[in-house]
Image (spheres, helix red, strand yellow):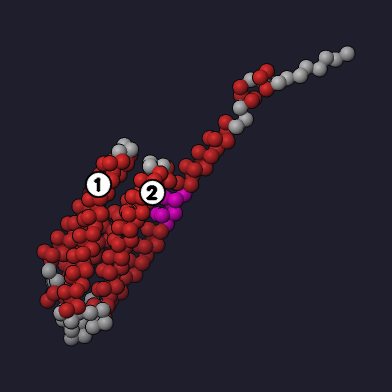
Amino acid sequence: MTAVIETTPNDLPDEAVDTQAPHGGHDDHDHHDYAGDTIFGFWVYILSDCLLFGTLFAVFAVFSNSFAGIVEPSELFNLWFVAGGTALLLLSSFTFGMGMLKAQNRDMKGMMTWLGVTFALGLGFLIMELYEFHHFSQAGATFDSSAYWSSFYALVATHGLHVFAGLIWMIVLYFHFKRDGFTEDNHARLSCLSLFWHFLDIIWICVFSVVYLMGVM
């Protein structure tokens, strides 16, 4: 007669009983892949934005001498004023980098402080740009006054709209971090915003060089 041996979960090794352990690691792996896919997808968006700005730069180059007898840029451009706005935007890139370092150290107060400074600098740049648009329009250089000014506003204002979107994004992230803290999703969102903000700085350097410097020559 063969004896039948019954086993209970307590008689089994821990490795055999703990069937749920791999699932937790699998979930963490999937979550990590999700964050990585988010950043990769945002790089794809950045490349598409490069195409957008490349097209706007090309249009501006084509119409760079089409003034239609209206006021020319050399009469209106104030390089010192534009240089001031440029300094604000470039400095905001540094302060954002400091905020990222604080986020890596999980320093909530430090990160929020640096992001607040970044927001203020970006807002200052945007206010200066709007003031410049108002000044130009008062002098007769409106969006529909000539092909040059149409291409100018299309390029510079598109960049300004991106800066505005970045400021809104910062406000949304503030509430995300206040609610959830330093989660992996929030880190991914902050990393994407960092890419976006530094990208805008690079585009603005091109705008300053191509539009403003060449406009006063």
Instruction: Characterize the local packing of mark 2: few (<14), some (14-19) or many (20 or more) Cα atoms within 10 angstroms.
Output: some
The vertical placement of 25 against 164, above or below, is above
**Residue 128 in the figure: left or right of residue 169:** left
Residue 174 placement (x, y as % from top left): 33, 50
Q: Main secondary structure of the magenta part?
A: helix
Query: Which quarter of the figure is the N terminus placed in?
Result: top right
Front in this rendered view, residue 178 or 104: 178
Q: Quadrant of residue 122?
A: bottom left
Task: Give the numbered dot on residue 114.
Answer: 1
**Residue 149 in the figure: left or right of residue 41:** left
Residue at screen point 46% across, 49% down: 37
Residue 142 placement (x, y as % from top left): 23, 79
Sequence-earlier tag: 2 or 1: 1
User: Between tags 2 and 1, which lies in front?
Assistant: 2
Tally of numbered discs: 2
In terms of secondary structure, where does tag 1 sit? helix
Residue 153 placement (x, y as % from top left): 26, 73
Q: Which amino acid, by three-letter code, is at mark 2?
A: His
Q: Which residues are magenta?
A: 37-44
Front in this rendered view, residue 113 or 26: 113
Task: Give the numbered dot on residue 176.
Answer: 2
Q: Does the stretch in magenta take in 38? A: yes
Q: Which amino acid, by three-letter code, is at mark 1?
A: Trp
Instruction: Characterize the local packing of mark 1: few (<14), some (14-19) or many (20 or more) Cα atoms within 10 angstroms.
Output: many
Q: CA distance from mark 2 to mark 1?
A: 16 Å
